[in-house]
Amino acid sequence: MITVRDGVRIFRRDWQEAGLPVIALALVVAVSAVTSVGIFNERVWEAMQSRAAQSLGGDLVLQAHDPIAPRVVDQAKALGLELSQQVEFPSMMLTAAGSPRLVSVKAVDEKYPLRGAAQVAERPYGQGSAAHKIPATGESWAHSRLFAEARFDTGDIVQLGEKSFRVSHALITEPDDFGSFFRMAAPRIMIRLSDLSATGLITSSSRAHYRIQLAGTRDALNAFSKWLNRQDFPGLERRSVQDAQPSVRTALERASSFLGLASLSVVIVAGAGIFIAARFYARRQSTTAAVMRCLGASQRRILRIFIFRLVRVALTASCVGGLLGYAGQSFLSALAEEKLGFSLGPPSLWPLLTGILVGLITALGFGLAPLLKLPTVSVLGILRGEEGVAPPSMWLTIGLAVFTSGGLIFWQADEAVLTLWVMGLTVCLVVGLTCGGWVILWLATQIPVSRPTTRYVMSTVGGRRGMGVMQVLAFGLGITALLM
């Protein structure tokens, strides 16, 4: 049984192995970038969802020109959804002095609104405060504009149809002000829904909007939407959070996508570094693999041992990078709160787990190919002082790298066309850097140099073109990531 002391000893030994610290450092940087951007995107997205719900007064809004069927209300209640009903229509209001004024009447029930809050004040155009209840029976709230146009004040009596109302507060803002035509043409006056029948204003020929606001869990809302799709309710319109502020949502979706792709470019650069470090690590471990073969270890066991080492280091580094990203996202969130003008919600753990998973996938996708040759290391080659481990298959290396990069980019972009564009440009960049690197290293061996030290350096660099090209590739991808 492995004790904690054994675990510490194994971890210390792994950290001292040549190549593994570089892999760990690359993963820490990559995972911290993915985690911080992921948490930041999620917090901004949730905040915008909340703001959009407040602008609707609920998570889902149903609206019709005729009274909404009672079975819609029954189904919403059966699914555990909260609901609030309102009626909105234009009408004439009479002041105590007898002057008429066109107004937009809004009758709301006691649960209004389900999201957000109306802002009211004691005086017109005053400092608004959140209203925690609707107008009392026999009372109304009037928009500040109506006070100036109809020339009355709070506490005065106004007439709506057959019922009189005392204006108790000035209505500053509404969370669900949809800006309808008659709402823009006529100032708002808000009353209780239970007082509406006493006014006698609603008849079969009234031009009224009947509205139901719904709020609840995502599963309940999805179930209700699916049920609604199977029904036939002529004239029934629905509006969800996805429909609110479409321009802002589109801009945020694009910004989130490109931020995610920028963070993934760091992952791809880290992948190039991981491949170089894993190649170096495999060469240094060729003697160890040869000794294992001499002691009777099977190729499968040798491969399993080295893959387990890679996974162990990758998991540790990914956890460290995830924690750093979790802490670092607060800086991005502080900048966003300053620019957006509202606070973001608390961060969740899901992007942290996603970042750790991305780290493991990156380590295996870019670092596995060099390790696959260790079980077939030549014992005689090691004894003769030769490089016992063969270089990894070029097609296997490229295949794993492309599959890993493409999968991560598609996961982030969630769009096949954008993924193909990014992958195509990345392949062109890799091909260009590879060809350029080969040409530069070949020219390094052809340039006549008189100084022995310089000639030795140039011949050494030219003699290890494969490693040199990989370094050129890593630097090129790194500069590209910075430019993004």
Image: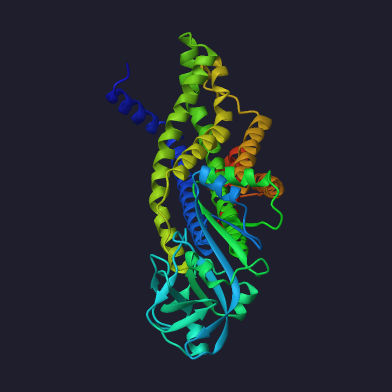
Q: Is residue 205 above or below residue 367?
A: below
**Residue pushed farthest left?**
5
**Residue pushed farthest top?**
296
Q: Is residue 377 above or below residue 408?
A: above
Look at 66% across and 63% down and name the residue there: 65
Count of numbered circles on the image: 0
**Residue 287 percent location from the top left of the image:** 47, 21
User: Is residue 131 rendered to the left or right of residue 188?
Assistant: left
- Any part of residue 451 in sight: no
**Residue 411 percent location from the top left of the image:** 60, 43
Look at 72% across and 48% down and name the residue there: 417
Q: Is residue 296 above or below residue 302?
A: above
**Quadrant occupied by the N terminus:** top left
- Any part of residue 449 in sight: yes
Viewer-nearest residue: 238 or 75: 75
User: Is residue 320 rendered to the left or right of residue 297?
Assistant: left
Q: Is residue 288 above or below residue 67?
A: above
Viewer-nearest residue: 274 or 17: 274
Look at 51% across and 55% down and name the residue there: 45
**Residue 336 percent location from the top left of the image:** 46, 63
Viewer-nearest residue: 384 or 82: 82
Image color mode = rainbow
User: Is residue 98 rendered to the left or right of residue 153?
Assistant: right
